[in-house]
Amino acid sequence: MDETLLMIPGPTRVAPRVLKAMSENIVNHRSAVFGKILKETNEMMSEIFQTENQSYLITGSGTAAMEAAMGNIVEKGDKVLNIVGGKFGERFMQITETHGGNPVELKVEWGEAVNPEDVRYILEEEENIKAVTIVHNETSTGVGNPIDDVGAIVKDYDALYVVDTVSSLGGDDVFVDGYNIDICVTGSQKCLAAPPGMAAITLNDDAWKVVDNTETSTYYLNMKKYQKSGAGQPPETPYTPSVSLMYAMREALNMIMEEGLESRIKRHKLAAKATINGVKALGFDLFAKEEVSSNTVTAIKMPEGVTDKEFRGTMRDKYRIELAGGQDHLKGNVFRIGHMGNITNREIITTISALEMTLKELGFDIDMGKGVAATEDTYLSV
Amino acid sequence: MDETLLMIPGPTRVAPRVLKAMSENIVNHRSAVFGKILKETNEMMSEIFQTENQSYLITGSGTAAMEAAMGNIVEKGDKVLNIVGGKFGERFMQITETHGGNPVELKVEWGEAVNPEDVRYILEEEENIKAVTIVHNETSTGVGNPIDDVGAIVKDYDALYVVDTVSSLGGDDVFVDGYNIDICVTGSQKCLAAPPGMAAITLNDDAWKVVDNTETSTYYLNMKKYQKSGAGQPPETPYTPSVSLMYAMREALNMIMEEGLESRIKRHKLAAKATINGVKALGFDLFAKEEVSSNTVTAIKMPEGVTDKEFRGTMRDKYRIELAGGQDHLKGNVFRIGHMGNITNREIITTISALEMTLKELGFDIDMGKGVAATEDTYLSV
């Protein structure tokens, strides 16, 4: 039996050479040997974040990095503008609250992107907003938010711009310095195609100034400690990191460097287009508005008359393709195809083909081959 | 060139079969397949903690688990008795403070164990102590604290008993239920001999009552979320876990089950005795009082007239054996030999032999073979 093909928005398929790197013998995490690996990996992270800032790797999930961002800049009573258009936007708001902050919520309809002018309006109206949080790629809804336009607005105000690129970095345009991002976080297991369990964060000088004047409310994720240990000779992490995941991360980032970040992002954009064209040709409706749909995950309305269990169950059990369900109130109403990481035209076409067969089998009147043809056309159009 | 032999108090040598398990393909962390692995691993953790409680695995270091303990039971102004006799005792106190607690510090001389009667004295004198923290095995000083006797005392008071067994669990006696421990934490990379990057925690009903009535000040380490996700069908973690490290953890715990926990602890006790007898025969002085010396790490005074760099450098560069240095004010004055995890008589004897050669080379007047003989005698005495 071959492996299940993960077409979910993380974790994504990990290349054999990355798995192999991960299984190397453990070394002392406070040795020159490990310091060199840490330094190389951090430097590649900064390159991928497209920033001159230092980056830091944290053993933990993307959520840990989101908390590392907020727990170091928010004190009791601090006002934070949280842009919330899905589960991960909500999470940023909950983390803000956990650390004593007072959220000002900018609600965005699930499936839509934020209107940058709404951000400007709130920043004009509300005084003393310390930070603005936004999720670049809202994994729960398949929406890509305009982090460039929002960044251009936040720049004019005295608030830090905190961006979650957990499911976009490496698969969509993220220019940390170019977009005026003060703090940017990401995870290992999405477009970077490393195994889950590592997160990364980068902070610029403006962010560090705030960190230095904030009483940190997290110990494990205290960024000042990461900064201090990271500046050591050899560079270290404050607490024992996952040595094995660091090996894997370095190898996964090496692969990105070999492919070239620009080519990789192009590949992701094309995969998104091919997926969208394929599912539309099969009669599916997208959940997110197409003009703001994500480059790395497509959310699709569940066809009428079929349950999530039948639909995704057939895809998984018969075709060994794992799709993601809907989250929270979208459970059962939406399914999601992740097309991130090492995904190529082969995996997209296989997935669209399996969708055709699954629909047919579940009693839908399907023009077999139509979805695959639309996908093929998309790939041939470039 | 063979690999460096890690004789440090974590990370420890990881068996090839564990490294192999870790390099399996990634699966969806919200699937039945992964749920089964998570459940099995959690259950083995409870068996090793020797408790009827549920255990939870966290992607992060042992420090993350220490914070998971305190961040869920401490609110602003809560009084906590922190027993501090080394770097990790201090860390528990710092974490208490990070979460708004008011530490009552019971200072213990570095190198000595806590006197349980001192704990009773403070619990009698101070009102409203919400929790008592203790580090079982103080990795920084090589001291094993009497967590059984302290537990018998704390039981008589209305305070939670929180025990760090990061560098002892799997290598020394830890009976979570038998010692009246309310919250116990550990790490993957010490006596459990898994790769670094995972931590575990277990809480009993008394602890959960406090957790339920505490406004949690950590998001990533919010134990209520772990409890809720862990009770799901399939069992899950609230945030994406390191799937690969979970594979490794399961395999490492399988190995403990095969060896038998009791045999494993005996092996560790003998390794400690053999190490101590070997270094004493070479004229080294122990840093910790011998009657309270740890079963998993031995702290030794640096011989006069030699620098840490020369001494540990020779051990590492010439004999490919990595020892740990001293921490904080012990830096340069102490070195530490970790004898935890998969360490057998072979590794202990190799290490003592390398110590003999290193001392000789650095100009000490050494009876070659004397240390090794004492080690051999110890192994033959059982």
Image: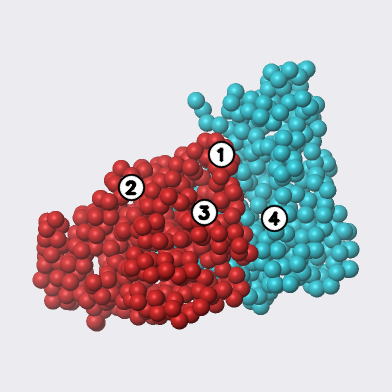
Chain colours: A red, B cyan
Which disc is residue A256 wearing?
Answer: 2
Q: CA distance from mark 3 to mark 2?
A: 20 Å
Q: CA distance from mark 2 to mark 1?
A: 25 Å
Chain letter, disc 4 residue: B
Q: Residues within 10 Å of mark 4 (few under 14, many from 20)?
A: some
Q: Quadrant of residue A98?
A: bottom right
Q: CA distance from mark 1 to mark 4?
A: 23 Å
Q: CA distance from mark 4 to mark 3?
A: 19 Å
Please tell me whether mark 1 sits on a helix, a strand or a loop.
loop
Q: What residue lies at 23% left-to-right and 72% top-to-bottom?
A: A290
Q: What residue lies at 64% left-to-right and 39% top-to-bottom?
A: B8
The answer to which of A334 and B90 lies nearer the viewer is B90
The answer to which of A349 and B84 lies nearer the viewer is B84
Amino acid of disc 1? Pro
Please tell me whether mark 3 sits on a helix, a strand or a loop.
strand
Q: Disc 1 designates what residue?
A: A234
The answer to which of B374 and A1 lies nearer the viewer is B374
Q: Is residue A264 left or right of residue A181?
A: left
The answer to which of B246 and A138 lies nearer the viewer is A138
Q: Disc 3 designates what residue?
A: A59
> Reading the chain from its start, which is encountered first: label 2 or label 1?
1
Q: Are marks 4 and 3 in contact (CB under 8 Å)?
A: no
Q: What residue lies at 77% left-to-right and 34% top-to-bottom?
A: B301
Q: Which numbered mark, 1 or 4, is in the foreground of this view? A: 1
Amino acid of disc 4? Arg
Q: Disc 4 designates what residue?
A: B91
Does label 4 lie on the same chain as label 1?
A: no
Amino acid of disc 2? Ile
